[in-house]
Each structure stands twice: as C-alpha cells, then as structure tokens.
Image (cartoon, rainbow, N blue to C red):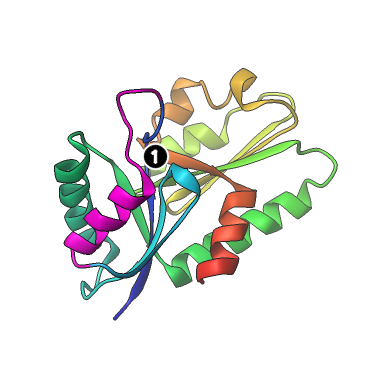
Amino acid sequence: MPTYVAFLRAINLGARRKFPKDAIRAATEAAGGTGVETYINTGNVRLTHPARSAAKVRRVLEEAYAAEAGFEVPTVVFTTAELAALTARGEELHAGHAGEVGNHYVTLFADPPTASAVEAAHALEHAGETVVVEGRAAYVLLAGDIHTSKALSSKQFNALGQGTARTVKVLRTVTAKWC
C-alpha cells in the first residue's frame, strides 16, 4: 500500500478548533489509514492507505476529520516521494540564501496554484523576502519575521490559494522520520 503524509490546516488554534493527536489518529484509521503516526500537535500525519492517489486520500481524510472534529479540516496530502522532493528543494533554496534567511516557511497546497497566480507571486519584491512557487509548494524565505512579512500578507500570495504552512525545519524532520 502507498504511504502518504497529510498536513492538516488550522487545527489546535484557539478554543474552537481543537483536534488532539489521538482523535486525528482515530479518524485517520476510520478513513482506512494504517500505520498511522503523528508528529507534534499541528497536524502532521503519516499513513498507508489503499487509495492510489493523494487526491483520493485527501477526500476520505477530510470527510473523516470533519466527522470526528465537528468542523472542516482542510488537508494537504503528498506521497512520501513527493514530500522528499519538495523538502530537498526547500533545503536547496535555504542553502542558496545562507546568511540572508532567518525564517523559511513552506506553504503546501492541495492543488497547484494557477500560472498567473504563480507569476504574480514571483513578481513580489520586498526587501529580505523571497517567494518561490513550484508545484504545490510556495517557499518563503524571510530575513525578518512571519508576522511582519509583506509578501505573506499580500494579495498576490493569498491568490495562490488556501494552503497550510510549515517551517522548513518541520518538513526536514518529518521527511527524515517518514520518507
């Protein structure tokens, strides 16, 4: 059976969107996942599943998560090979900006952004901020802080679509553990 890594969006933020790891594990198993593991309480899940596409796994997980949590849980799913490749690309970008980057975030998308949205995001020019969008990932390298980033709060970046962000460090750890 194929192995996948799922990234859940907007959970365990405040009192209303609580979705503990044990509940995530139970819902993932109810959706047909086996060998389920989680990493930290921000919605990083490894599973094997008989479905042969990440899109199909995403659909069954989102249904199971909504049923268990009582609210919608947007989910982004990658095969382990896809995750390893996008993490390697993140490491390459990070190394290419050594000394310039204080924070490196990767926004993961369920579907690739449109070509026009990618072009607009690449055209962003803010000092100390670099945006590279490839496939279903947007790499954002910041000299400063995520909370003061002009690129991340721009309409061009938001036009890429709804995604879920992780630091490159989290992706590095998850990839080392599961890929």
Which residue appears at 25% of the width and 56% of the height? 26
Question: Quick one: SS at disc 1?
Answer: strand
Q: What segment carries the magenta color?
A: 14-32
Question: Could you tell whether 158 is left or right of 84 in the image?
Answer: left
The verdict on residue 19 being magenta is: yes
- In percent of width and height, residue 100 lies at 81, 38
Of 113 and 28, nearer the camera is 28
Of 95 and 167, nearer the camera is 167
- In percent of width and height, residue 128 lies at 74, 29
Of 108 and 60, nearer the camera is 60
Which residue appears at 62% of the width and 27% of the height? 146
Which residue appears at 77% of the width and 52% of the height? 96
Q: How many callouts does the rendering have? A: 1
Q: Amino acid at mark 1?
A: Gly
Q: Which residue is mark 1?
A: 163
| Residue at the front extreme, as displayed | 22
- Up-down: is 148 above or below 125? above
Question: Could you tell whether 41 is left or right of 142 in the image?
Answer: left
- Up-down: is 82 above or below 90? below
Q: Quadrant of the N terminus?
A: bottom left
| Residue at the right extreme, as displayed | 99
Residue density around tag 1, few if under 14, some if 14–19, many if 20 or more, within 10 Å = many
- In percent of width and height, residue 110 lies at 33, 49
Q: Looking at the rendering, which quadrant does residue 85 occupy?
A: bottom right
- In percent of width and height, residue 123 lies at 57, 32
The verdict on residue 40 being magenta is: no
- Up-down: is 166 above or below 146? below
